[in-house]
Amino acid sequence: MTDHIWNRVAVVMGIFLAFAGVMHFASPQFFNDIVPPWLPPTREFWTYASGVAELVIAYHLLRPSRRRDGAIAAVWLFIGVYPANLYMAWDWRDRALNEQLVAYGRLPFQFLFIWLAIRIARSIPDPDAPRVPGDI
């Protein structure tokens, strides 16, 4: 894929994260319920903290000058929220089959999101990287 395509993917990911971040505040109970209960200090803390992180990362992904940093941060976010997806799959094990499929379906998608964020970051040159003689 060309760099132009990865810019489009970054915009889609940014919009997705902005929507998800807003939903953490508009409908926090869903997110509270999937936070593992043993994480201190509270489930609400993690719901709102991850919502803020998603909004900040979305902003960076949507801004071309900050896109690389946003993509790198998205990788860490997707890794960081994976325990909530694991907990959700475990916690929903006795629910209806369609709900179980949603919970289990989220697990592989997280790896897709991590891969996409890595590809976005790699498509943008690092301005701080040392230049190699002969680079233009």
Image (cartoon, rainbow, N blue to C red):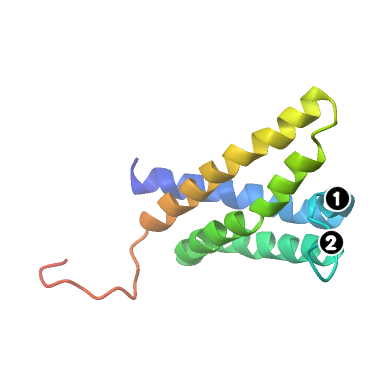
Q: Residue type at mark 2? A: Arg
Residue drawn 63% across and 59% down? 80
Tell me if residue 5 comes above or below residue 64 in the rendering: above
Give the crowd class for mark 1: few <14, some 14-19, many >=20 residues within 10 Å: some
The residue singled out by tag 1 in the image is 33
> Is 50 or 6 nearer to us in this picture?
50
- The outermost residue toward the top is 97
Q: Secondary structure at mark 2?
A: helix
The dot on residue 89 is none
Q: Contact, CB < 8 Å: mark 1 with mark 2? A: yes
69 relative position to 52: left or right: left
> Is 133 or 46 nearer to us in this picture?
46
> Is 43 or 50 nearer to us in this picture?
43
Give me the C-alpha separation between circle 1 and circle 2.
8 Å
Whole-percent x and y of residue 46? 78, 63
Residue drawn 69% across and 46% down? 86
Q: Secondary structure at mark 1?
A: helix
The residue singled out by tag 2 in the image is 43
**Quadrant of the rendered structure where residue 81 is?**
bottom right
Q: Residue type at mark 1? A: Asp
Mark 1 or mark 2, which has the lower sequence index? 1
119 relative position to 104: left or right: left
> Is 53 or 82 nearer to us in this picture?
82
